[in-house]
Image (tube, rainbow, N blue to C red):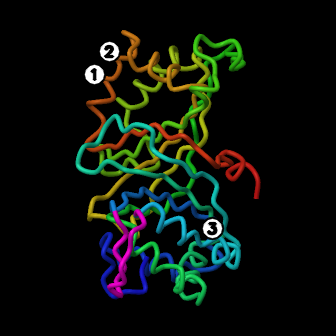
C-alpha cells in the first residue's frame, strides 16, 4: 500500500483493507501476503528528483525489514522470476511472500514512520504489483506407498548451473467458490500430474487460498500454489511428459479461468516452515 492517496502501481481494494483492519482479535491470525512485482526500467521518484537507478534497485532500497520486524512479520519466500510460462498481460520480475502475525499487523505497518520513509523507493521502482492476502489450505496426500525421492536420485538433480526452483501458480478457477475447495477437474489433474511429478522430486512448499487482493488490477484470484523441484530441467521434464500434457488439456485447462505460472529462483525459502511452525 502507499502513503499516496492513489498509488501509481495498482488499485487498492478498500473493502479488503477494511476487512484486514477490523477483523476481531479472536478471529484474527497469521496471513501470508503474496507479492507479484513488476519494475520500471528506471526508477521514477514522485518528488521529481533525477534518477539513474533501475526499478529493482529502488525496490532494494525500499526493503522494509525494520518495519516488518516492528510488527512481528518476516519474509518467508523471495526470489527473481527465471521464466514465466503462463500469463502474458504482465511478465513479473520478482515474487515475495511475507508472513504477518495478524491481518491487522499488515495495516498497522503502513502507519510506521520507518515504513512511510522507505516507501518512496517502492513507489519509484514499481511499475505494477499484485498483493494478495492468503491463508494455507490442505495439500493433497502422497499416493499410498509413495516414498519421497532423494534429489540426488532423480533424473534431473540439482547442479551448480541448474539448482532448485519454485514453481508459482496463481489461479482463478471457473468455479467462483473455489478458493478453499479445489474444483473436480483440478483434483483430477493433480492426481495424474503427481504420477510423473513425484518421481522427479516434487515437494509442495505450500498452497494458499486467497482471501482478497489488497492492491492489484481489479482481478480476483482463488489460490496461489508453491511447488519446489530439484532443477528447472526436472520441472520441464514433467511439463513435457505425454501423460502430463494430456492431463493439462483434459482437466487443468478446463478448471482454470486465469493464471500465472512462473519459475522462481528463490533467494529465501522458508515458506513450508512458516506454515508448520508458529
Q: Which mark is residue 246?
A: 2
For this orientation, the residue located farthest to the left is 89
Q: Position of residue 5 (x, y in %)?
A: 33, 88
Q: Position of residue 232 (x, y in %)?
A: 51, 26
Which span of residues is magenta-colored?
42-54
Residue 23 seen in the current view: yes
> Residue at the spot x=49%, y=36% of the render?
167
Q: Is residue 52 magenta?
A: yes
Q: Which mark is residue 100?
A: 3
Kindly identify which residue carries mark 1.
249
> Which numbered disc flags the more N-terminal residue, 2 or 3?
3
From the image, give the main secondary structure of the stretch colored magenta.
loop
Q: Of residues 11 and 188, which is closer to you in this image?
A: 11
> Residue at the spot x=45%, y=60% of the render?
56
Left or right of 36 in this view: 278: right
Do the CB atoms of the residues marked 1 and 2 lie less than 8 Å apart? yes
Left or right of 129 in this view: 34: right
Residue at mark 1 to residue at mark 2: CA–CA distance: 5 Å
> The C terminus lies in which quarter of the figure?
bottom right
Rate crowding at label 1 as few (under 14), some (14 to 19) or many (20 or more) other CA atoms within 10 Å.
Answer: few
Q: Which mark is residue 13?
A: none
> Which numbered disc flags the more N-terminal residue, 3 or 1?
3
Rate crowding at label 3 as few (under 14), some (14 to 19) or many (20 or more) other CA atoms within 10 Å.
Answer: many
Splitting the image into 4 quarters, where does residue 141 fall? Answer: top right
Amino acid at each position: 500500500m502507499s502513503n499516496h492517496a492513489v498509488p501509481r502501481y495498482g488499485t487498492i481494494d478498500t473493502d479488503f483493507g477494511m476487512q484486514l483492519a477490523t477483523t476481531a482479535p479472536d478471529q484474527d491470525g497469521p496471513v501470508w501476503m503474496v507479492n507479484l512485482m513488476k519494475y520500471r526500467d528506471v526508477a521514477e521518484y514522485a518528488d521529481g528528483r533525477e534518477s539513474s537507478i533501475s526499478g529493482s534497485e529502488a525496490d532494494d532500497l525500499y526493503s522494509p525489514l525494520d518495519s516488518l520486524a516492528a510488527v512481528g512479520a518476516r519474509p518467508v519466500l523471495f526470489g527473481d522470476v527465471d521464466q514465466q510460462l503462463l500469463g502474458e498481460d504482465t511478465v513479473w520480475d520478482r515474487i515475495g511472500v511475507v508472513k504477518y502475525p495478524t491481518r491487522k499487523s499488515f495495516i498497522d505497518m503502513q502507519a510506521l514512520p520507518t515504513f512511510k520513509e522507505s516507501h518512496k523507493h517502492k513507489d519509484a521502482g514499481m511499475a505494477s504489483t499484485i498483493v494478495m492476502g492468503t491463508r494455507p489450505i490442505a495439500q493433497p496426500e502422497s499416493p499410498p506407498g509413495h516414498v519421497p525421492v532423494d534429489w540426488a536420485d532423480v533424473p534431473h538433480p540439482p547442479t551448480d548451473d541448474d539448482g532448485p526452483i519454485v514453481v508459482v501458480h496463481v489461479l482463478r478457477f471457473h468455479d467462483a467458490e473455489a478458493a478453499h475447495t479445489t474444483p473436480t477437474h483440478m483434483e483430477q489433474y493433480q492426481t495424474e500430474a503427481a504420477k510423473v511429478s513425484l518421481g522427479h522430486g516434487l515437494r509442495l512448499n505450500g498452497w494458499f487460498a486467497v482471501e482478497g487482493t489488497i492492491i492489484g488490477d481489479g482481478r480476483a484470484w482463488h489460490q496461489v500454489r508453491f511447488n519446489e523441484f530439484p532443477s528447472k530441467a526436472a520441472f520441464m521434464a514433467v511439463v513435457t511428459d505425454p501423460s502430463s500434457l494430456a492431463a493439462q488439456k483434459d482437466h487443468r485447462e478446463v478448471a482454470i479461468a486465469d493464471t500465472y505460472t512462473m519459475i522462481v529462483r528463490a533467494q529465501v525459502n522458508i515458506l513450508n516452515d512458516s506454515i508448520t511452525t508458529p
